[in-house]
């Protein structure tokens, strides 16, 4: 069975559907997709704004994950407003 995850580049707002493999982390799936140039640091967040870099990519089949800058600067999901 094929599992596909939709990745959204938070900087360019481009989308790419990626077929993910069992045992592959979300970050490995993004690296293998070519969405982010090799050597660049990035993080991936779910719709709730939680970092999911090391989670199993197959857990997110059919969903859209946001790929952006590593750390607090990741765009996507819900973040509390800065004060």
Image (cartoon, rainbow, N blue to C red):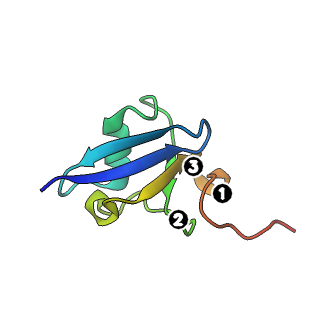
Residue shown at the point (30%, 66%) measured from the top left = 59
Location of residue 44 with respect to 10 vertically, above or below = below
Q: Residues within 10 Å of mark 3 (few under 14, many from 20)?
A: some
Q: Residues within 10 Å of mark 2 (few under 14, many from 20)?
A: few
3D distance between C-alphas at marks 2 and 3: 16 Å
3D distance between C-alphas at marks 1 and 3: 7 Å
Q: Which mark is residue 47?
A: 2
Residue 30 at what x, y percent from top left? 38, 43
Nearer the camera: disc 2 or disc 3: 2
* CB within 8 Å, label 1 to label 3: no
Q: Which of the image's four quarters has the N terminus?
A: bottom left
Q: Which mark is residue 70?
A: 3
Most extreme residue toward the right is 83
SS at circle 1: helix
Q: Is residue 66 left or right of residue 21?
A: right
**Frontmost residue, 12 versus 79:** 12
SS at circle 3: loop
Q: Residues within 10 Å of mark 1 (few under 14, many from 20)?
A: few
**Frontmost residue, 5 versus 24:** 5
Residue shown at the point (19%, 57%) measured from the top left = 23
Label 1 vs 2, first from the N-terminus: 2
Q: Is residue 56 left or right of residue 64?
A: left
Q: Is residue 62 left or right of residue 41?
A: left
Residue 53 at what x, y percent from top left? 42, 57
SS at circle 2: loop
Residue shown at the point (52%, 52%) measured from the top left = 66
Residue 58 at what x, y percent from top left? 26, 60
Q: Which of the image's four quarters has the C terminus?
A: bottom right
Q: Which mark is residue 72?
A: 1
3D distance between C-alphas at marks 1 and 2: 15 Å
């Amino acid at each position: 069975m094929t599992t596909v995850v939709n990745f959204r580049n938070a900087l360019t707002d481009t989308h790419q559907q990626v077929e993910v493999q069992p045992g592959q982390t979300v970050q490995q799936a993004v690296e293998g997709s070519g969405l982010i140039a090799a050597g660049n640091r990035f993080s991936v967040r779910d719709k709730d704004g939680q970092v999911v870099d090391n989670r199993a990519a197959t857990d997110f089949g059919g969903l859209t994950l946001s790929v952006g800058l590593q750390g607090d600067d990741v765009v996507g999901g819900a973040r509390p407003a800065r004060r």
